[in-house]
Amino acid sequence: MKKWVGMMLLVLLLTACSGASSVSNQEEQSKEEQKTEQSKKNEENEKTEKEEEQKDNETTEPANTTPAEPQYQLTGNWSFEPIGDANPKVALITIDDAPDNQGVEMAKTLKHLNAPAIFFVNGHFIDTPEGAEELKKIHEMGFPIGNHTYSHSSLPDLSQEEQKEEIIGLNDRIEEIIGERPKFFRAPFGQNTEYSKQLAAEENMLLMNWTYGYDWNQEYMDATKLADIMVNTDLLGNGANLLMHDREWTAKALPDIVQGLKDKGYELLNPALIKTP
Ligand SMILES: [Zn+2]
């Protein structure tokens, strides 16, 4: 009931805000809003039905349920450790600077390989309709979207106001496109400020850097070499947080990286199991 009253207030507010537009526009807008309200209500009803269905399933098929509790937490060196008795031998795949030329293809590859990953996106890639569409596709394939700032600037060089725009502005834009705010934050070059840490906390995002990555080194701008080092580096260990980028050679190397990690006995960490603020 409270929620409904809140929505009505919102409608009133929105109508009030559009005072400058013509009457017919206002009418159209409020019709639109009513429609949206109605479809929201329908969605809510459907959701409740689905939830009830799921509850029924839980009693009959406990094996099919998704765990509600997080099973992994970030450690001081940006890797992940089990909270309870989850498998410690996991590795997280992250793709930064997305969605550039390879993002959607990389998401398709990973989905095909049944490999979960976080895509850390930049605002300058999603401020065109095409870029927004790419982001939507990646999200719809089931990959969580992380915040990698609007313009990939070095945060310590920016004023607080600019940092806010880089971080909160991007969350607003992402929410506009996919309907939800990111739960993960990674600063460009891993360079945070006290203020960016504060903003991430206020937005309930888990701030993370990474354990290792190679695809930005000239030496590893080659799919075969990159796949080899990503899997055979001494830095690979339990809970490793693997940094990769939206790049051509990385896209090509992905199948071998995923297979190589699996061959070494690593399970790919599902970001949905990570504890966020
Ligand atoms: Zn980056």
Image: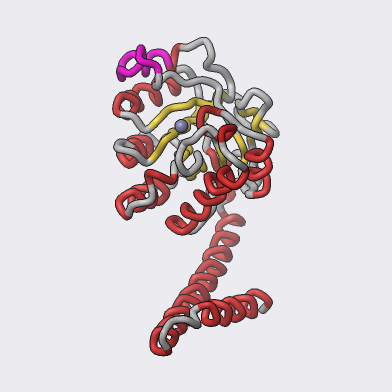
The answer to which of 61 and 208 lies nearer the viewer is 208
Q: How many marks?
A: 0
Based on the displayed image, in which of its 4 quarters is residue 151 positioned? top left
The answer to which of 61 and 266 lies nearer the viewer is 266
Q: Residue at x 64, y 23 (%)?
A: 77
Q: Residue at x 68, y 36 (%)?
A: 194
Residue 63 drawn above or below residue 31: above
Based on the displayed image, in which of its 4 quarters is residue 208 positioned? top right
Q: Residue at x 47, y 79 (%)?
A: 33
Residue 111 drawn above or below residue 56: above
The colour style of the image is: secondary structure
Residue 66 visible (yes or no): no
Specify whether residue 40 is painted magenta.
no
Q: Residue at x 49, y 25 (%)?
A: 242
Horizontal and vertical percent position of residue 8:
59, 81
| Quarter of the rendering occupied by the C terminus | top right
In the image, 114: left or right of 61?
Answer: left
Specify whether residue 224 is painted magenta.
yes
Residue 120 visible (yes or no): yes
Q: Which residues are magenta?
A: 217-229
Horizontal and vertical percent position of residue 29:
43, 81
Residue 203 drawn above or below residue 35: above
| Quarter of the rendering occupied by the N terminus | bottom right
The answer to which of 242 and 123 lies nearer the viewer is 123
Based on the displayed image, in which of its 4 quarters is residue 57 positioned? bottom right
Most common SS among magenta residues: helix
Horizontal and vertical percent position of residue 67:
60, 46
Most extreme residue toward the top is 234
Horizontal and vertical percent position of residue 73:
66, 34
